[in-house]
Amino acid sequence: MPDSVVIIPTYNEKENIERMIRTVFGLEHPFQLLIIDDNSPDGTADIIKRLMPEYDGRLHLLQREGKLGLGTAYITGFRWAMEHGYNYIFEMDADFSHDPKDLIRLYDACAEKGADVAIGSRYITGINVINWPLGRVLMSYFASVYVRTVTRMPVMDTTAGYKCYRREVLEAINLDKVRMKGYGFQIEMKFTAWKFGFNIVEVPIIFTERQEGSSKMSGGIFGEAFFGVMKMTIRGWFRTYKR
């Protein structure tokens, strides 16, 4: 049984998805891929279905009825991955902002070096972001500063979406209780893993803005995260975190 699955949520990623699939399957580690498509009108799922016979048993697709949010996509994927017995479960974007080669480094951090959660971190060695406007870099960086200040969580890149979890982390977190559905989901998952006492390690990566397709970022995403972090922290004062 393969030990690792990479979960990639998609919505209108036809320009990127075939190249991403072939790149991940070209790596030396035998990762499997689970793509969760939210009924992309551009035919993303059709491309995946065409490739599935070529990568028999390694490429998996879950289709949902519409755009249901990043957090719910990953939670759907986490449940699927645990049901199918994977030990290392990854989150990654479809648009090559996350370099697939870094999957190996995240895997090694968990499988060889004892991390429970490995984060592909843009900010652990400075600011490693390419092709973002200055305003967006500052907003992202200071969002992480804000989260660290409010939560006291010792993570430099609190909003990072490139991660590897050991299955034990996802088993400990009650996924039914995860409140935030947008990019705040990334913060909440790290915060909950930290409160449970899991070993979180940041692996430095270079984040490159997408070349193809359009970004799904919006102001509402940051609004949810801003107020959600306060509520999450206060709830954490009254919750017991026992594995």
Image (tube, grey):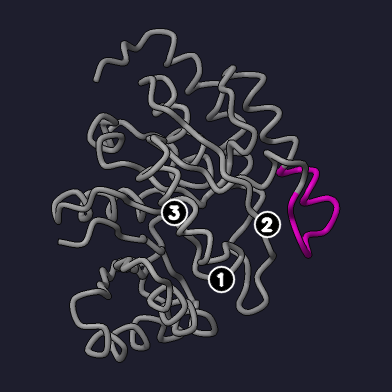
Q: Mark 1 points at which residue?
A: 95
x then y, percent, for residue 3: 24, 56
**Residue situated in front as seen by the camera: 221 or 97:** 97
- In this view, 237 is above or below 232: above
Toward which corner of the image does residue 115 lie, by quadrant?
A: top left
Quadrant housing the N terminus: bottom left
User: Disc 1 vs disc 3: Cβ atoms closer than 8 Å?
Assistant: no
Residue type at tag 1: Asp
Start and end of the magenta stretch? 128-140
**Residue situated in front as seen by the camera: 48 or 64:** 48
Q: Name the residue under label 2.
A: 206
Q: Which numbered tag is attached to residue 70?
A: 3
Mark 3–mark 2 Cα distance, whole angstroms, equals 22 Å
* Residue at screen point 26% across, 15% down: 242
* Residue at screen point 46% across, 33% down: 190
Q: Does the magenta stretch include residue 224?
A: no
Disc on the earlier residue, 1 or 3? 3
x then y, percent, for residue 87: 24, 48
Toward which corner of the image does residue 148 lie, by quadrant?
A: top right
Residue type at tag 3: Leu
